[in-house]
Image (tube, rainbow, N blue to C red):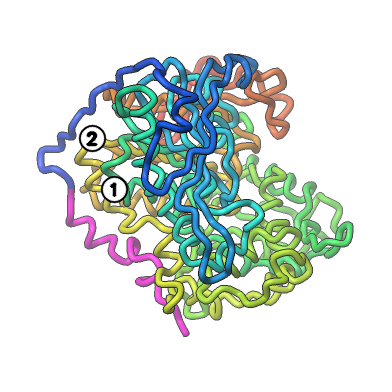
Amino acid sequence: MIIRLSKLAPFVAGLLALAACGGSDDGSLPQLTAARGATLAECSALATSFRFAATNITAATLVPAGTLTNAGQPVAEHCRVTGRMNERVSPVDGQAYAIGFEMRLPRDWSGRYLYQANGGTDGVVVTADGGNSLGSGGLLRNGLQQGFAIISSDAGHTSAQNPLFGLDPQARLDYGYQAVGTLTPMAKALIRAAYGKGPDRSYIAGTSNGGRHALVAAARLPDEYDGVLSGAPGIFLPRASMANLSQIKRWDTVATTRVVNGLPDFESALPPPERRLIANAILARCDALDGLVDGLVQDTEACRGAFDLARDVPTCSGPRDGSCLSAAQKPVVVAAFSPVRLASGELFYPGFPFDPGLSQGNWAEWKFRNSVRTARNPVSVGFIFSTPPSSDIAMATDTSRTAAFALNFNLDAEAPKLLATNAVYTESSLSFMAPPNPTRLDRLRDRGGKLMVIHGTADAIFSIDDTAAWYRGLDAANDGRANRFARFYAVPGMGHSRGGPATDQFDALTALVEWVENGTVPDRIIATARRAGNPGGANAEVPTDWSPNRQRPLCPYPLVARYKGGDPEAAASFACER
């Protein structure tokens, strides 16, 4: 069976048609008013006084100032509320499920609500502080310090139920989109009970799967959220996982070591010295394209034409020693960065740009370890994204079986399972995971809502090319004026969500609030390199010869940060240009 691109990615197939549709005729959009704060009126009483359908509040406790800290600074006094919604026993797998959550309500509230979306396969209620889970390398002032009332959740299952929650059809839907939809009105009601008023402004933010959650909310819940912040979004996450699995057999052909400490590991197919070799070759060709040789490739598009792996990386005449790639390796590496296609030639998932950030450890984690050494990609595909789910339950805990699944993976045979449904699983994974009509965000736009998407150019699992294609589709659907309400920023050198040789510390949340509530258009976001001594934590992958004060502007796509003279470490020395 051949799965057609028009079914798999309708926003691409319909791009030209969407270009004929548009937003408001005069180009004006509403300006939302600023939030107004309030003081916490109740905390411990919420455990017994708050009532909401299908909700069980398990605790409400006042947390003293300084109990939590961030970037070396104390977090102020706040109320921590925990609970569960929609407790049930699955008729399919017999497991007990609930949507677990935590809310943190500051004593001095800004009038703003934030849904802090989880990454990965969820299953854990993380601290609801609006911090690192938002996709920056460490906010110096997290959301709780900024006065947000914040909720986090496990999206309807526990870590002990990962990944076999995918056997339960409702747990799939909660993970995909329904947990956010269920929790949102409850969270707003709880805020009203705690402060005597509901939130004036509502935001949702997250990275990776959390970035996907945010984009799904922009499409499904446009009346609930005024500002959406999406980092490293897996817009079509099931396809990204399958595309990654489809490349494992190629890596196997050039791996020199297949087992490390008894577990499958193909990183020897392209170990760190060889990745640094490629990174240096990319820099030699592309670093100066933005006007400054500084260890960063700002002009990713120009680099596509300037760098050629076959030409610019030496071919080994003898054994591999880190100074060359073998003739067998080169086509495998090129294929890893190229679009993944079905046997028919149709596009399944976009490729990845060559970026010096491939030298980072996070790149290898996603390209190699998460498909054969750990269970992440195989079990997600097998149990959560495929209909019907895999019958090999032992694969959930046996890494030898997950490796076998990856090594025997057949994309053309497995891809149709992303669109399949049956009597038990009535929504396909591309239905419950992806934003419906992802380029038609008219309701969010017309309300005055704003959307910001941030993605690292060296992300090894979710392609920035996929995000760029989505943004071009959004722009076409808005007659070339998507930037009135949506901006997309690339972070050169950054890996998946953070890290890499990059300026990966930035506060996009504040920029989003300023845009939503004050109309301050985020024409650039200032990002900083996290050298040793950074209050938010150091990034060990920042080159040692970079200044600890290095800053760069993150520019809205398709603009590029170009050096114009002056202090090479100052963001002010760069202009966002084509």
Residue positioned 39% across, 18% down in the render? 41
Residue most extreme to the front: 48
Residue positioned 54% across, 33% down in the render? 59
Q: Is residue 454 left or right of residue 284?
A: left
Q: Which residues are magenta?
A: 1-22
The residue that disc 1 covers is: 475
Where residue 67 sits in the image (x, y, percent)? 63, 19
Where residue 443 sits in the image (x, y, percent)? 22, 46
Q: Is residue 247 visible?
A: yes
Q: Nearer the viewer, residue 431 or 281?
A: 431
| Picture quadrant of residue 279 | top right
Q: Earlier in the sequence, mark 2 or mark 1?
A: 2
Q: Is residue 499 above or below residue 65?
A: below
Q: Nearer the viewer, residue 384 or 430?
A: 384
Q: Is residue 91 left or right of residue 360?
A: left
Q: Nearer the viewer, residue 34 or 475?
A: 34
Question: Callout 2, which amino acid?
Answer: Gly
Split into 4 quadrants, where in the image is the C terminus? top left
The residue that disc 2 covers is: 448
Q: Is residue 505 above or below residue 305?
A: above
> Do tag 2 and tag 1 residues touch (Cβ < 8 Å)?
no
Element carrying mark 2: loop
